[in-house]
Image (cartoon, rainbow, N blue to C red):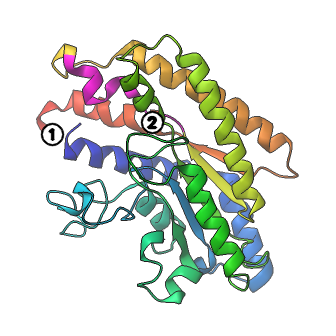
Amino acid sequence: MGNKAYFLCCLCIYAYMTTFPPVDMIEEVDVVLKRQHGKHKHGEIKLFVFGDSYVDTGNWPKSMSSSWKRPYGFTYPGYPSGRFSDGLVLTDFIASFLGIKSPQPYANRKKISSHEMDNYGVNFAYGGTGVFNTFVDQPNMTTQINYFQQLVEEEEQVYNKEKMSSSIAIVSVAGNDYATFITKNNNNMEDLGNVTKSILSQLELNLRRIHGLGVQKIGITAMEPIGCLPKMTISSSYENCSEYANSLSIFHNQMLHQIIDKLNNQTSRPIFFIIDLYSAFMTALNIQQNHPGNS
């Protein structure tokens, strides 16, 4: 997918969230803030981010990642910023929707003011990572949550129950887990059903753990249509998506919905919600197909 297509995808995600936001998340956060302060103060919403390159805003070391080299960052902020994009990533759009600054990368914690960390949350995501270990030597989701737990324990005054009452987490993982499995098995997808169950079982534990650390709303991305990724469309000269590969995304998303329903049924109010990347990607790709000159 070209840079413009990726931008369109992000734009569709933002438009989707703006038009059809997770109503329960917005209403409950708004109620909490009004109860405490009499009006909505955006700066008090803390956003915590876990996952991969869709949400990483600069955690990779500069000496180790192409995300710190051109053409990344061409449209925003005008130079490479550690994002795996020529512009904004999903984290930035969600932060904008919530009316807060995009949270600083965890790797910058010793370089920035405590005000930034205390008021807007932290981004723990590392591009290329997954629920489990992948081909990149960077923290998987479990380790990212370990960093979060350490921060909560060390900064009790900042991340206590009261101050975490308006906190939100975004989780974007799984794509790299599938890519790692498929590559290791020479594109053999026979055991993908069991792989999906393993990924989602661990993901469920991870989501419970994030909530247990005080986060009040947790959004998890659905799988994008992986059959539309460049590697999967080579055989059609990048013209058509692989329906077979897309069926994996659909299966993953169906099981993810079941897990989210189960988790929400076990809490006193809905805590978990899904960010529908599958629909967002398909919308962007359909725009490209109908307007081929924009690719």
Q: Is residue 19 left or right of residue 271?
A: left
Quadrant of residue 165 within the rendered picture = bottom right
Helix, strand or loop at mark 2 = helix
**Residue 227 shown in magenta:** yes
Residue placed under numbered mark 2 in the picture: 175
Q: Residue at x 78, y 42 (%)?
A: 263
Q: Is residue 67 left or right of residue 150?
A: left
Q: CA distance from mark 1 to mark 2?
A: 26 Å
Span shown in magenta:
222-234
Residue placed under numbered mark 1 in the picture: 294
Q: Residue at x 49, y 10 (%)?
A: 190
Alpha-carbon neighbours of circle 2 within 10 Å: few (<14), some, or many (≥20)?
Answer: many
Q: Note whether 220 is above or below 244 in the view shown.
A: below
Q: Residue at x 21, y 65 (%)?
A: 80
Q: Look at the image and tell me whether residue 288 can be seen.
A: yes
- Of 285 and 50, nearer the camera is 50
Helix, strand or loop at mark 1 = helix
Amino acid on which disc 1 is placed:
Asn
**Residue 142 position within the rendered picture, expressed as x and y whole percent measured from the top left:** 60, 51
**Residue 117 position within the rendered picture, expressed as x and y whole percent measured from the top left:** 53, 80
Q: Is residue 20 left or right of residue 110?
A: right
